[in-house]
Image: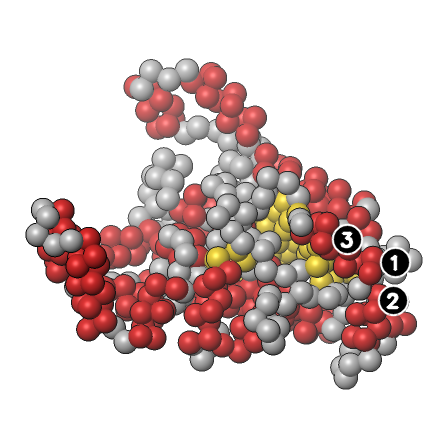
Amino acid sequence: MTHRTRSLLLALVATPLLLIAASSKVGADPPSKVQRKPLKVFILAGQSNMQGHAHVRTMDAMSLSPITAPLLKEMRNADGSPRVCEQVWISSLGSADEERTGQLTAGFGAEPRGPKIGPEFTFGIYLKKSLQEPMLIIKTAWGGKSLHTDFRPPSAGPYEFTPAQLDNLKKQGKDIEAISTERTKTSGQSYRLMTEHVKHVLSDIKRVYPNYDAKQGYELAGFVWLQGWNDMVDGDVYPKRDQPGGYDNYTTLLAQLIRDVRQDLSAPQLPFVIGVMGVGGPTSKYGPDQQRYKNIHQNFRDAMAAPAKLPEFQGNVVNVLTENFWDMEVTALRDKEKTLKPKVDEINAAVKNGKLSREAGQSASDNLYAETFTPQELIVLRDSVSNAEFHYLGSARIMSQIGKGFAEAMADLLKTRDKE
């Protein structure tokens, strides 16, 4: 059963009863009060890390960390099944081949080799706890997209190759006219898909949120941006990325994106949260193997965070440094694992040469790990990750904190706005 089919069935059968029950809980808004408030709508946008690559199986290891164990209790029911957020609905485009809609729960992350979660799960859980009212999330995220081209804001105009890039293309014998035409065509394509989908959902909210009452209306209440890897690693577009100011154009484009989103969606003061790329953790804690990337990573993070410092964005644009949610325990365990490589290589060579059977080799490897790590460390090392570092290790321990951090930042922005 698809998310959409299951969600529609829940909406037709269970949701009215659930809403009645929820309204009787301490701290919940009375039904009449909820109905008078415009439905709050939040947009989540970006590339693969906004899609989310944390496999649900990595949620188990959250219980082994004092930081994430409390989050896990919010994400699961008493029987261990993923929580379904009764008053939070979602439309997700780009994480799967087709749009997925339904009540927010685990599984709205990237579809391949899933089910997975992204920031949306804990974002919805914790922002709902703060707002104490229904909400709708519209997520648009596509893997491998850049801000310089794919999400390029309209006010920036189409991407134009630099003289150095054109010279390089000529040396390669490329058809410059064809390549330039294609780049112009793709400039802003993801931006357009994003804004078109938001408008599509808002034109018929009941399609996604069956309990929506058109009389109460809706409010575009916030936007969260998590993107950047493709720009950070693009030395062709950012040839001076290891030098101060090497990513200045990313700052310019991100500021333009904020302005254009607000204009195109008719929300001039739309609260905006920037999830600053933090793969690998704080650069001050980078190990020897990471030193060659340190300046590049920090330069990019500084450029990504810079728009929030602009005078025009004071009070309505904030940064969330996702580096603070990196799993340093896993980093330490992986560093420790590297010391085993020579012995592991010897075991593998012995198996390959026929000196050890496959079973004996596996036993020797298991014993080596058992002598080096505690049982709990082995669980964290093996079961808390499901993807590459550039996808935040595919770790629910990391992704759940990122989503919660976004929710807290958004809640603060809304409180600040409401006081004005």
Label 3 vs label 2, nearer the camera: 3
Q: Which residue is mark 3?
A: 8
Instruction: Looking at the picture, tell me which residue is in the foreground, 94 or 36.
Output: 94
Q: Earlier in the sequence, mark 2 or mark 1?
A: 2
Q: Position of residue 112 (x, y in %)?
A: 50, 45
What is the spatial separation of the Cα atoms under label 3 and label 2, in whole angstroms? 21 Å
What is the spatial separation of the Cα atoms under label 3 and label 1, in whole angstroms? 16 Å
Q: Which residue is mark 1?
A: 213
Side (left or right) of 9 relative to 272: right
Dot 2, crowdedness within 10 Å: few (<14), some or many (≥20)?
Answer: some
Dot 1, crowdedness within 10 Å: few (<14), some or many (≥20)?
Answer: some
Q: Amino acid at mark 1?
A: Asp
Q: Position of residue 350 (x, y in %)?
A: 10, 52
Q: Is residue 312 above or below residue 259?
A: below
Q: Earlier in the sequence, mark 3 or mark 1?
A: 3
Q: Which residue is mark 2?
A: 35
Q: Amino acid at mark 3?
A: Leu
